[in-house]
Image (spheres, grey):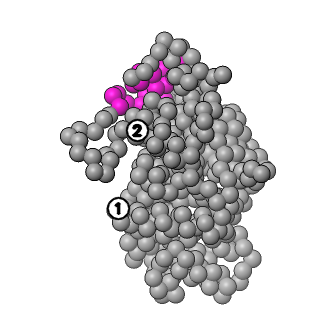
Amino acid sequence: MDKKPILSVHNLQVEFPTRKGNLVAVNDISFEVNEGEVLGVVGESGAGKSITGSSIIGLIDPPGRITGGEINFLDQRIDHLSAEEMRTIRGKEIGMVFQDPLTSLNPLYRIGRQLTETIQTHLHLDDKNARLQAINLLAEVGIPSPEIRIDHYPHQFSGGMRQRVVIALALCANPKLIIADEPTTALDVSIQAQIIALLKKLCKEHKTAVILITHDMGVIAETADRVAVMYAGKMAEIGKVYDVIKKPKHPYTVGLMNSIPKMGQDTEALMQIEGSMPRLNEIPQGCAFHPRCNQVMEQCKKTVPPMIKLEDSNIACWLYPSK
């Protein structure tokens, strides 16, 4: 029996109105996330990854707005909720981990105060039990001497330790879903590995679903169960991580994979995808990737390809005509 998804996004569209017309930042994308699953969302800067994450938790910067599709979370539609209703879900049911931990932590308050306030906002605990819960969370995310460190300020922690505190903050109410937006980008490689291991452990032990937004395919390969590849606001390919990494089908995904250095491979130059992603006001007709594609056909320049199922993946590309 198939697991019921914790989150399902159907035909989501996000636009930013400007004086020159509406810019479509996320264009008709659909995906699901199951309990205890890590879904990696990958693509170049400007692909629409972070806006997709922000739209799920109701934090799109104005004047951006959702103009189409729907977002369902635990059998409840959440894309049309009021700011107050969304605030109840955010933090309690859906946690968020940002790239820079200092955007989530108040530098003027001790870590303990920030954790206990968040815990008491969502759970009915007195001060003593909230503090005990905060210490336990700090221990769980690998902060040494948590009963001492709980009374320290954010500036007294290293970057990697701050990110652990932010993950503890996201876990305060035991949410069903965590959206992690580039959580390891600002960290060195050894600390990255620790944060990745921590996210995987949380998925396994808490059955928390994670949407991991990143441009780093190494992080995706190490962490994700499935991966969604975005390009210019659209979904290019989505499938199991092994299939997408080892057997990519969309020419953009193939290009991404070929641009990653391989262990033990002696090459003078890595392959690269010519050109760059179009601006939102310059997205070409048809498949947005066609000006950079080495397998472009006439149909690619005129018509947007539909998302079709091919083996265990879904691909939007005219190389694979729908049956």
> Residue sitting at 56 percent across and 52 percent down?
225
Judged from this view, the residue extending furthest toward the left is 268
Is disc 1 placed on a helix, strand or loop?
A: helix
Give the labeled residue for mark 2: 256
> Residue sitting at 48 percent across and 20 percent down?
284
Q: Which one is in front in this view, the residue at disc 1 or the one at disc 2?
A: 2
Q: Is residue 236 left or right of residue 278?
A: right
Q: Nearer the viewer, residue 10 or 18?
A: 10
> Residue sitting at 62 percent across and 29 percent down?
307
Report whether residue 285 is seen: no
- In the image, is residue 279 part of the stretch drawn in magenta? yes
Give the labeled residue for mark 1: 189
In the displayed structure, 204 sits above or below 145; it is: above
In the displayed structure, 230 sits above or below 156; it is: above
Type of amino acid at the residue the image marks with label 2: Leu
In the rendered image, residue 111, in percent from the top left (x then y), is placed at 51, 76
> Which quadrant of the figure has residue 62?
top right
Is disc 2 placed on a helix, strand or loop?
A: helix
| Residue neighbourhood size for the residue with mark 1, other residues' Cα within 10 Å, grouped as few (<14), some (14–19), many (≥20) | few
Type of amino acid at the residue the image marks with label 1: Val
N-terminal-most mark, 1 or 2: 1
Tell me the chief SS of the magenta region: loop
Q: Nearer the viewer, residue 261 or 219?
A: 261
In the rendered image, residue 160, in percent from the top left (x then y), is placed at 41, 68
Q: Which residues are magenta?
A: 273-293
In the displayed structure, 187 sits above or below 13; it is: below
Q: Is residue 121 left or right of residue 110?
A: right
Q: Nearer the viewer, residue 108 or 288?
A: 288
> In whole angstroms, how far apart are the C-alphas of marks 1 and 2?
20 Å
> Which quadrant of the figure has residue 25?
top right
Judged from this view, the residue extending furthest toward the top is 298
Q: Nearer the viewer, residue 10 or 149?
A: 10
